[in-house]
């Protein structure tokens, strides 16, 4: 319907405006609304959706780490009242972070992944599915952590199947998925050997083919490859690995 198209266009416009104004919480709402229309998100709109939730959640992940450190400090000092205050503030941040994660996870599961018609879109969405379950695992304990970790693992593996079947080894979408999959194994699963295996395979496969790409495509792939190499260097020099 023409009217739906106009409303959708306005939602995307407001999302771009919110991005410029660095109002990422509002940007998530506009891009969620745009994604709920029948029309599939194009690559630019997928990027807007990714930026919105990455920024909104990323700000809270950073805040959570700061408050966790403060809570531990106060506990170590034996300051029970300030420890309790920090704990309550941490839980407030966790609630906000969880709400954003659950919103994007529902959108990915119910609408975006089932409706994706290209391999690039599917891989991007599976990567996001793994990422937001990973962020949930970071702030969860016990059963909830196990659930989130299992869901993240499944999402990364499902995305890898699509990537290996349909995308070149030099595809930045495939490389980006491998990067985050490896980070998941290192940071959440505490399995550095598997993290290095995933990262090294993706990097070495891409190195063999990158000279066959055009200049612009090679630059995009090289950016992700540099991140893979940086992480591999860090992980293989870590005495705890």
Image (cartoon, rainbow, N blue to C red):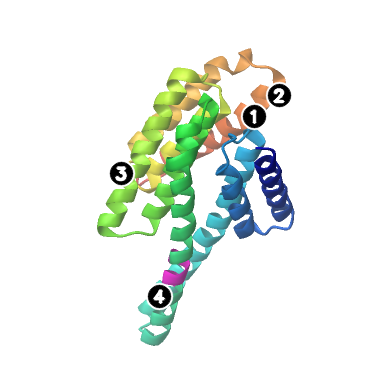
User: Which residue is the site of mark 1?
Assistant: 220
Name the mark nearer the viewer: 1 or 3.
3
- Distance between the Cα atoms at labels 4 and 2? 48 Å
- Of labels 3 and 4, earlier in sequence is 4
Quarter of the image holding residue 189? top left
Q: What stretch is highlighted in magenta?
A: 90-94
Q: Is residue 236 above or below residue 71?
A: above
The reply to whether dot 1 and dot 2 touch (C-beta < 8 Å) is yes
Disc 1 is placed on an element classified as helix
The residue carrying pointer 2 sits among few (fewer than 14), some (14 to 19) or many (20 or more) residues within 10 Å by Cα, namely few
User: Which residue is the site of mark 4?
Assistant: 87
The magenta stretch spans residue 93? yes
Name the mark nearer the viewer: 2 or 3.
3
Q: Would residue 125 be seen by someone viewing this image from the given angle? A: yes
User: Which residue is the site of mark 3?
Assistant: 150
The magenta stretch spans residue 194? no
The numbered dot on residue 143 is: none
User: Which residue is the site of mark 2?
Assistant: 216
Query: What residue lies at 43% left-to-right and 81% top-to-bottom?
Result: 85
């Amino acid at each position: 319907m023409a009217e739906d198209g106009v409303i959708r266009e306005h939602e995307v416009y407001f999302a771009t405006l919110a991005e410029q104004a660095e109002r990422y919480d509002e940007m998530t709402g506009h891009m969620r609304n745009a994604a709920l229309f029948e029309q599939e998100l194009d690559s630019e709109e997928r990027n807007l959706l990714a930026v919105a939730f990455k920024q909104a959640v990323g700000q809270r992940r950073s805040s959570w780490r700061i408050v966790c450190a403060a809570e531990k400090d106060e506990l170590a000092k034996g300051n029970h009242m300030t420890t309790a205050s920090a704990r309550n503030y941490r839980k407030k941040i966790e609630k906000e972070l969880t709400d954003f994660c659950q919103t994007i996870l529902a959108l990915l599961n119910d609408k975006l992944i089932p409706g994706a018609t290209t391999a690039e879109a599917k891989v991007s969405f599976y990567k996001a599915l793994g990422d937001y379950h990973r962020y949930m695992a970071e702030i969860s304990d016990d059963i909830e952590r196990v659930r989130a970790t299992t869901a993240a693992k499944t999402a990364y593996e499902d995305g890898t199947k699509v990537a290996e079947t349909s995308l070149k080894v030099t595809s930045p979408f495939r490389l980006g998925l491998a990067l985050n999959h490896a980070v998941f194994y290192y940071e959440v699963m505490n399995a550095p050997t598997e993290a290095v295996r995933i990262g090294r395979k993706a990097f070495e496969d891409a190195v063999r083919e990158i000279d066959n790409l055009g200049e612009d495509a090679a630059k995009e792939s090289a950016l992700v490859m540099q991140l893979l190499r940086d992480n591999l260097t860090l992980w293989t020099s870590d005495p705890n690995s």
